[in-house]
Amino acid sequence: MLPLIILTHRFLLFLSNSISSEHGFMIPKTVLVTGGAGYIGSHTVLHLLLAGFKTVVIDNLHNSSQTSILRVKKLAGEFGNNLSFHKADLSDRDVLEQIFVSTKFDAVIHFAGLKAVGESVRRPLLYYNNNLSGAITLLEVMAAHGCKKLVFSSSATVYGWPKEAPCKEEFHLSAVNPYGRTKLIIEEICRDVCSSEQEWKIILLRYFNPVGAHPSGYIGEDPQGVPNNLMPFVQQVAVGKRPALTVFGNDYNTTDGTAVRDYIHVADLADGHVAALLKLDESNTGCEVYNLGSGKGTSVLEMVRAFEQASGKKIPLVIAGRRPGDAEIVYASTEKAERELKWKAKYGIDEMCRDQWNWASKNPYGYGSQEDSTD
Ligand SMILES: NC(=O)c1ccc[n+]([C@@H]2O[C@H](COP(=O)([O-])OP(=O)(O)OC[C@H]3O[C@@H](n4cnc5c(N)ncnc54)[C@H](O)[C@@H]3O)[C@@H](O)[C@H]2O)c1
Ligand SMILES: *[C@@H]1O[C@H](CO)[C@@H](O)[C@H](O)[C@H]1NC(C)=O
Ligand SMILES: *[C@@H]1O[C@H](CO)[C@@H](O)[C@H](O)[C@H]1NC(C)=O
Ligand SMILES: *[C@@H]1O[C@H](CO)[C@@H](O)[C@H](O)[C@H]1NC(C)=O
Ligand SMILES: *[C@@H]1O[C@H](CO)[C@@H](O)[C@H](O)[C@H]1NC(C)=O
């Protein structure tokens, strides 16, 4: 009975998505994507192109390579023509103005920002300056050009150390580091902007832990330095860049003692952005927030085992003490996104690990590892 119910549910989701897409006039046709050369941005841009959107990317390439843009263009086939790229910093108001003068945007998706948690603790002003001024300049220029629809990448980090699982959107919010605080502040700015003027429609997406890559192995995450997150670290161990994975804490109150998180395939996350854009068009509420997660909790050891299976590589482990600041169990309630965005994650951890390994083994040095010709 259960598979049938799931099938019917999927089918209904599919139907409702395609009905709203058929009303072409309701769909934003041209989207500006800030930070579109980055990990989540590049996958989202690909899905936008394939869904028929014209897409303009602005990225300063501080933490990414233009190679990702070239590869997205290729993966998009005939739709690749609908992608254009500007190498620029968001704080450069003149460039942003020029882009808005030359193109009329229906909506903006804002990914651009610095996201290294450790660095945000050491260099808080850099983070506040880059992230807050970038977002504010963007909102001002959008307002000046009458573009008042925004999708913003927030993060599960705004739940702080949640007392309960799963995390619901209405939980109490708190910041546990400067990175989280910039997210929280930008969320608040968005709420204020929406209450100041009815025309604004903003969707805040709180991501859980994105992993995986496009199944082609052509685009993926390009970790720089010592990764802060589990899977980029595992990936570096698997390709021989690091000797072992350090597991922080095996005495948590979980099935195997290691911390539990919600991993989500980056392709599902990308689809969540397309769903959010469609929602912006039909909704009449100002500011809405949705969790984007799989809704399932997975322990560190479960994830490592799935990766070993997918890659055939042994991941040596070093067990260390708990890392200060880490929560025990965090995963998403996905009810609101399912109900209102008609979106639900399709992939499980086996597919996440398969695609992560496919990308990592083909690109052991990330985008630096091979030349891309332009043909
Ligand atoms: N990856 C995660 O685990 C995760 C989780 C929750 C939220 N997020 C958020 O999602 C967004 C995208 O994350 P990602 O993993 O794709 O990161 P990423 O570093 O791969 O992408 C961010 C992009 O923004 C660009 N950028 C940074 N500052 C800029 C500026 N001032 N002007 C123009 N471009 C600038 C970078 O060059 C990079 O290409 C970030 O805001 C991140 O905080 C990520
Ligand atoms: C996107 O590309 C396709 C295929 O080249 C083209 O038919 C379509 O008109 C383009 N869409 C936009 C909005 O330019
Ligand atoms: C750059 O991206 C990598 C890979 O996603 C990430 O580990 C790192 O924290 C990012 N650095 C900054 C400064 O955002
Ligand atoms: C900065 O803002 C970007 C874009 O909103 C976000 O993805 C990133 O996580 C933020 N980084 C910090 C340190 O707040
Ligand atoms: C451990 O978790 C179980 C079930 O999740 C709970 O019933 C129990 O009270 C927890 N123990 C401690 C010490 O928190």
Image (spheres, rainbow, N blue to C red):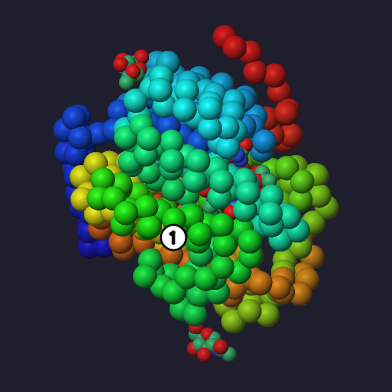
Q: Position of residue 160 (x, y in %)?
A: 54, 70
Q: Residues within 10 Å of mark 1 (few under 14, many from 20)?
A: few
Q: Which residue occupies the foreground of this view, 355 or 201?
A: 201
Q: Which residue occupies the foreground of this view, 45 or 104?
A: 104
Residue drawn at (76%, 50%) of the image: 226
Q: Is 27 positioned to the left or the right of 225 in the image? A: left
Q: Is residue 308 visible?
A: no
Q: Using the rendered view, name the quadrant where residue 121 is placed.
A: bottom right
Q: Position of residue 352 (x, y in %)?
A: 53, 48
Q: Is 202 positioned to the left or the right of 179 in the image? A: left
Residue drawn at (73%, 28%) of the image: 369
The number of callouts visible is: 1
- Residue 352, compared with residue 230, is above or below; it is above
- Amino acid at circle 1: Glu
- Residue hosting label 1: 188
Q: Is residue 177 visible?
A: yes
Looking at the figure, which quarter contains the N terminus? bottom left
Looking at the figure, which quarter contains the C terminus? top right
- Residue 283, compared with residue 173, is above or below; it is above
Residue drawn at (32%, 54%) of the image: 196
Q: Is mark 1 within 8 Å of ligand 4?
A: no
- Residue 306, compared with residue 89, is above or below; it is below
Residue drawn at (16%, 38%) of the image: 19
